[in-house]
Amino acid sequence: MRRLVPIGAVGFLVAIVLSASQPMRAQAPPGSAARGAAVGAPAHLSGGPRGVVKTSSGQPVEGIMVQLISSRSGIRTTVYTNGAGAYEFPRLQAGDYTVRLARPLEYRPYRRDSVRVDGTTRLPDILVERVTESEYLPPTPDILPQLSGSEWVANLPGTPEEKRSFANACGGSCHSFQMQMRARFDEASWRKLVLRMSDYGGRTLVGTARSGSAPTNPFQTPALAGLRLEKGEMERVVQWLVRVRGLDSPDPPLKPFPRPRGAATRAVVTEYELPVELSNIHDVAGAPDGQIWFTINRSPLIGRLDPKTGKVVTYTVPTVKGKIPGNHWINVDPDGIVWFTPVWAGGLGRLDPRTADMRIVYGGPTHSTARHPDGSLWRQGDGHVNKWDPSSPGFWTNPKPVKSYPIPGKSSTYGTSISWDGRYWGGGGNNGIVWLDIQSGEVREVPVPSGLSAHGRGNFDPDGNLWVGSKHGVLVKYDHQTERISEYSAPTPYANFYSAMADRNGDIWAGEMHAGKIARLNPRTGQWIEYVLPTPWSQDYNSWLDNSTSPVTYWYGDQYGYIVRIQPFQ
């Protein structure tokens, strides 16, 4: 059964942006620390090195990021100062560390090497000095690399139409804005680059999509057709880049976005660098044993990270002649079996880490697959929502769907997900979403009023509402009971969402691509918390939420080769 939900039944909502002001919704668990900078923090997020950041006149600095880098493992741990300028780390492994300020921006850099840390080490006060007393910062070589892509765009001259065209065209998800903002070319060169980036297929830039010569792959779908620029918009982007990033274009005085305050400072961020050169992490997933698995999108590797030690183990995925190596979706089942998709070859993989036994099949579920609690795999394709049973005879030689639900409109979905109770399937993309009631077989194709639903990966909240992200900086919610669509705009301008993930409490988490932040939305109040990341060019594709921890822990794999964990206090 198929239902087309009428536009009249669709609501539009832009959330109130109250960044970093969300009230506490749950008390910290018993035994939480009640002293120092991390007052009220869970015990495992406090009890380590601590100190204070203040100006030379004794004024505290709130929202500045203090970072410890282990000389043994290279793990980077970052905390934020509170309103009193105080900070406190979790208890870390004893050893030598580098202490630095991450993205000090309006303050001069601070760094001390070979600092001994052991337990509750009291670190020397950090005295900071402003670069200038003006609210605008000079565009110096020290400051420019600290800007997020969104800050770059916000600070450059131009009309809203020019900047939005640039953000939509050049900020889909394949790379940060840093490449364009740090480059300078003449008009002819910018025109070649914009054409190449907007008109060629997939993340591999092989073949031209407009002419149809791009190789067939899961990324070359109608869901991503909107990434191409029409001629008029392409010219607008070219002329804007020539004006602001031309050979003789001056860098303007800079006004960074406000520092985090309140709830946005109540978290610990840990970054794990991978020992794999030129890696492009795409998806991450947690295993029952606490290990974090990940895929690399443009090399034949999947791997696992031990968060306690930072040790990484990689596994090579067999390649197919004539196909680009690279992997996409990954999931770990309750038995510890790892499922993943060699995306460019259109395959599905299964790895048993205990035996290192790896199986690969082609022609079945691939790309962004959804795994049902019963072990079946689900994916939209060829005008159907298809279900596969990997335990069925012959699956690993010639996979065939065991059940299909027709979609007469043949909408294309980029992402796919299954609800927590296994009742609903959903996918986003192609300017709308597709929703399926698995028990009744009812299928709905739901347009998004603004048309801002590509890429459309996400999941279901505890109430059965489907959430997906948009490259246009909008989180999309579909309430199947009221048949309404709601849209929540990112608090930070010129940010894009690749996906949206609901946690066990109903909060929605999403990486703000180009903004260097992780957003957390309380849809009941419309309030946001934005956790500022210590690395400004961060690119969050897809994330994984560890709902077994209290509070929930957020994980993502960065496009630039490292894995990030965010542990909020509340």
Image (spheres, helix red, strand yellow):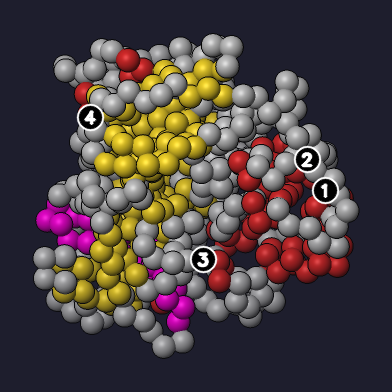
Residue 203, percent across and down? 55, 66
Q: Nearer the N terminus, badge 4 or badge 1?
A: 4
- Image quadrant holding the C terminus, namely top left
Q: Is residue 305 left or right of residue 530?
A: left
Q: 21 above or below 188?
A: above
Say which element carries label 3. Answer: loop
Residue appearing at x 51%, y 26% in the figure:
64
- Location of residue 70 (image quadrant): top left
Magenta highlight on residue 339: yes
Q: Nearer the viewer, residue 274 or 218?
A: 274
Q: Nearer the N terminus, badge 3 or badge 4?
A: 4
Residue 178, percent across and down? 64, 51
The part of the chain drawn in magenta is: 323-344
Q: Nearer the N terminus, badge 3 or badge 2?
A: 2
Tag count: 4
**Residue identified by numbered label 2:** 156
Q: Nearer the viewer, residue 325 or 347?
A: 325
Are the two marked residues, 1 and 3, in contact with CB atoms closer than 8 angstroms? no
Badge 3 density bin: few <14, some 14–19, many ≥20, Cα 10 Å: some
Are the two marked residues, 2 and 1, in contact with CB atoms closer than 8 angstroms? yes
**Residue identified by numbered label 3:** 219
Badge 1 density bin: few <14, some 14–19, many ≥20, Cα 10 Å: some
State the mark number for residue 119: 4
Q: Nearer the viewer, mark 3 or mark 4?
A: 4
Q: Is residue 357 visible?
A: yes
Q: Amino acid at mark 4?
A: Gly
**Residue identified by numbered label 1:** 244
Residue 21, percent across and down? 48, 16
